Image (tube, grey):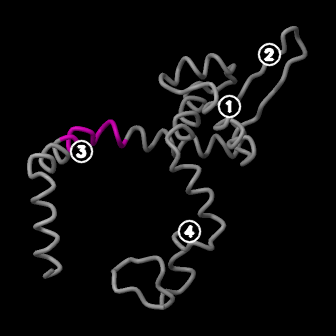
Amino acid sequence: MTSRFPGDTASADAPPDVMGPYRPDCPSRTVVETFANKWSMLVLGILKVQEGPLRFNELRRRLDGITQKVLTRTLRALERDGLVRRTVHPTTPPQVEYALTDLGISAGHLANAIAAWSAVNVPDIIRAREDFDRRGTAGAGRQERDRTGR
């Protein structure tokens, strides 16, 4: 199977070692999917900056806009992947803290590097979005037709 689109991951002609996580059957793709989740990235980044454990409600306060359900699901996924450690203290009521594991610390570096890159480049990205929106979707469709000849 050969794709007619350059860079298409469905191409059977590409050697597996070149395609790596871009192949649908590569196990590392599930890790990439974790990092593609905005809440996972933000949790990793906050816990890395904190450099210590945080309780659930403190995390939730720092992640403006996240629901309890989504934060719970995100923390469980990160714990399952070995990036976050959940510690329950035997108090009444039980206190639960979340901290990065060694693996999570290295992932936190990546999350914070992406955040730093975003902060530096956001003016250019906003400008590009405004230019795109000014051209409108009709212009984008016309450019696509011009490029493909259809």
Q: According to the image, label 1 marks what residue?
A: 72
Q: Residues within 10 Å of mark 2 (few under 14, many from 20)?
A: few
**Residue 67, position in %: x, y?**
57, 26
Q: Which residues are magenta?
A: 117-126
Give, as a three-letter code, the residue at label 1. Answer: Thr
Residues tagged 2 and 3 counted as in contact (Cβ below 8 A): no
Outermost residue toward the right in this view: 90
Give, as a three-letter code, the residue at label 3. Answer: Ile
The answer to whether 55 appears left or right of 118 in the picture is right
Q: Quadrant of residue 137?
A: bottom left
Residue at position x 60%, y 22% from top?
59
Label 2 or label 1, whichever lies nearer to me, is 1
Q: CA distance from mark 2 to mark 3?
A: 42 Å
Give, as a three-letter code, the residue at label 4. Answer: Pro
Label 3 or label 1, whichever lies nearer to me, is 1
Q: CA distance from mark 2 to mark 4?
A: 38 Å
Magenta segment's dominant SS is helix
- SS for callout 4: helix
Q: CA distance from mark 3 to mark 1?
A: 31 Å
Q: Residues within 10 Å of mark 1 (few under 14, many from 20)?
A: few
Q: Residues within 10 Å of mark 3 (few under 14, many from 20)?
A: few
Tell me, for residue 95, which label it has, or none: 2
- SS for callout 1: helix
User: How many numbered discs?
Assistant: 4
Q: Earlier in the sequence, mark 2 or mark 1?
A: 1
Residue at position x 72%, y 38% from top?
76
Give, as a three-letter code, the residue at label 2. Answer: Gln
Q: According to the image, label 3 marks what residue?
A: 125
Q: CA distance from mark 4 to mark 1?
A: 27 Å
Residue at position x 45%, y 43% from top?
113
